[in-house]
Image (tube, rainbow, N blue to C red):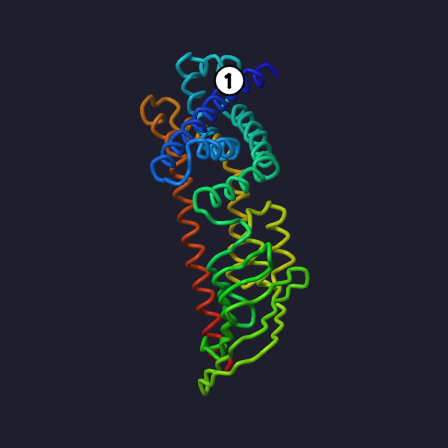
Amino acid sequence: MALIFYIFKRFFKYFFLINILSTFLFNFIEFFEKIVRVKIASTGTILHFILLNLLPSFFSNFPLSSWLATCLLLKELAQQNEFEIFQLLNINPTRLFKLFFILGIILSATSFVGKEYISLNLLNETEHFKLEKFKQNSTQIVLNKWLILPDNKLLFFQSVNLKNNIGSNFILIHMSDEFEIQKTIFSKKFEINSKINNIFIENYSIIQSENNNLKEEKNLNLNLPSFFSQLKLNLKIQTLFNVLQSIITQKNLLPYNIWYDLLMQFFKRILFHLQVIIFPLLTLCLFFILPYDNKYKWLLILTPYPLVLSLLALSEVFAYIFLIFIIFVMHKKLEKSY
């Protein structure tokens, strides 16, 4: 118990010191970057934005801080020859590994609660504040979106006003299984009803691709649950529970690429919380690979953070390549079936 308290106290001292310093450093840089680039906002507005962003930044820095705290703790223990004392007390690396695993679980739980239940509302408020004050756009207006809908449909709108439930420049393209345009519906204005997932268009035009005939029609009602599901996803950052709920309940409503992006987002956010377990353990393992080397073991413990980030980037690239391959194979199978 004394060892646990001893290691925990020193680790968390480094962890919180690093995290607080990095949070203020990153936001300090952000403050001056906004002053230079944003001409329409006052210094007070920028400062308000930075204050909103402090807590989300604090929790976002957990992986980096856990890695650096582990490095500094190992350096302090080595400089004070405490590893030799541990050997005399029969405290082996396996026991230290277990302690750092417990540390990682505590940090991971704190990261999960902090990001998903404490700072997420602030993060959404920060994004809305940035949109309104820096980009002069209302959070109630969604602009220029292409959406992929089920049954081989593409939808574009120039704007949707969620306050007044009206939109402008609506285009709906119906595609064949061979990705050829069958017909196109377009209108300058449309109305939305999110309660029943309905789009109403009073006056619209329709073009049939077979003969290129243009017809003027009236009163079109479209029930498009996928449109409203994707619109909701664009409004704010969803909680992890809401993302999981969308993955499970809206699999048949959302296009495959949107559903796949949600699945990737879910695993990336889970992996973020696991990183605070991975970094201390990986750093500790690399340190004890060469226990008697006083040069390369210090270089090795500097590699976990860039190594894991590189692997995550590569895994995402390979995941998208794999998805493209699956789509290509499925398309070939469809061709053969016809």
**Residue 277 shows in this picture:** no
Residue 290 at x, y percent in the picture: 38, 27
Q: In the figure, 230 relative to 78: above or below?
A: below
Q: Residue at 44%, 27% (x, y): give it.
A: 24
- Amino acid identity at mark 1: Arg
Residue 332 showing in the rendered view: yes
Where residue 19 appears, as percent x and y from the top left, is 47, 26
Q: Is residue 241 left or right of residue 139?
A: right
User: Which residue is rendered at x = 47% and y = 62% of the image?
Assistant: 158
Q: Secondary structure at mark 1?
A: helix
In the picture provided, is 63 more to the left or to the right than 35? right
Is the residue 271 above or below the residue 74 in the image?
below
Q: Residue furthest left?
A: 295
Residue that mark 1 sits on:
10
Q: Is residue 55 above or below residue 85?
A: below
Q: Nearer the viewer, residue 14 or 207?
A: 207
- Residue visible at 62% across and 64% down in the picture: 225
In the rendered image, the quadrant that contains the N terminus is top right
What is the quadrant of residue 75 in the picture? top left
